[in-house]
Amino acid sequence: MENSNYIEKIFNKSREKVLLQDIEEYFKSPQEESSVVEFKSGEVEIIDLYKEITAILNTEGSLLIVGTPREKKEKVGKNHRVICQGALIHSSFKNKDWLYQKIASNIVPTPTNIKINEYLTSQGTVFLLDVPQSTNP
């Protein structure tokens, strides 16, 4: 299976070059989830993260950003859309090694090729999880 590059699709730069400032800048304007990007605030429970990752693995893959602003509904004409905008809400998850270990021990079969960028700050951590489609859904 080829490597996914959802981080590059969203931020228009290689995953090694994406900085925390790029993520903060991204959420200065209203952002909506799509088939290639999913949002979870830093308040997400680890069990909900497993469910989200499993859903992504069983579809076409996606970028999962953990540490986003809370989602809010915005009225557009007669409809509503769900957006994320504003300050990041950092996660209290320890680090990417801890996160890899938790994912590997709680999702069967163990997902391979998930790439995680971590951004450690004094407020907590923001994670970018590049989750490719599973070869074994």
Image (spheres, grey):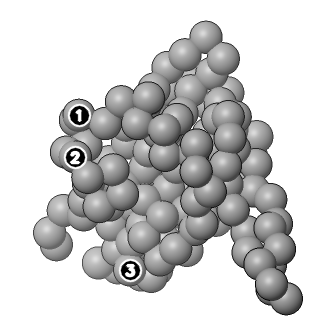
* Of the pair 12 and 100, the residue shown nearer to us: 12
Residue at the disc numbered 1: 17
Determine whether label 3 and label 2 are within 8 Å by CB.
no
Q: Which amino acid does label 1 sit on?
A: Lys
Q: How crowded is mark 2: few (under 14 residues within 10 Å), some or many (20 or more)?
A: few
* Residue 121, position as x, y percentages in the image: 55, 16
Q: Going by the image, does 44 lie left or right of 106?
A: right
Q: Residue at left 45%, top 82%?
A: 59
When asked about the image quadrant of residue 5, the answer is: bottom left
Farthest residue, direction top: 122
Determine whether label 1 and label 2 are within 8 Å by CB.
yes
Residue at the disc numbered 2: 13
Which structural element holds mark 3? Answer: loop
* Of the pair 53 and 33, the residue shown nearer to us: 33
Q: Residue at left 58%, top 59%?
A: 31
* Residue 133, position as x, y percentages in the image: 35, 74
* Residue 128, position as x, y percentages in the image: 44, 44
Distance CA(mark 1)–CA(mark 2): 6 Å
Which structural element holds mark 1? Answer: helix
Q: In this view, does 27 lie above or below 130?
A: above
Residue at the disc numbered 3: 60
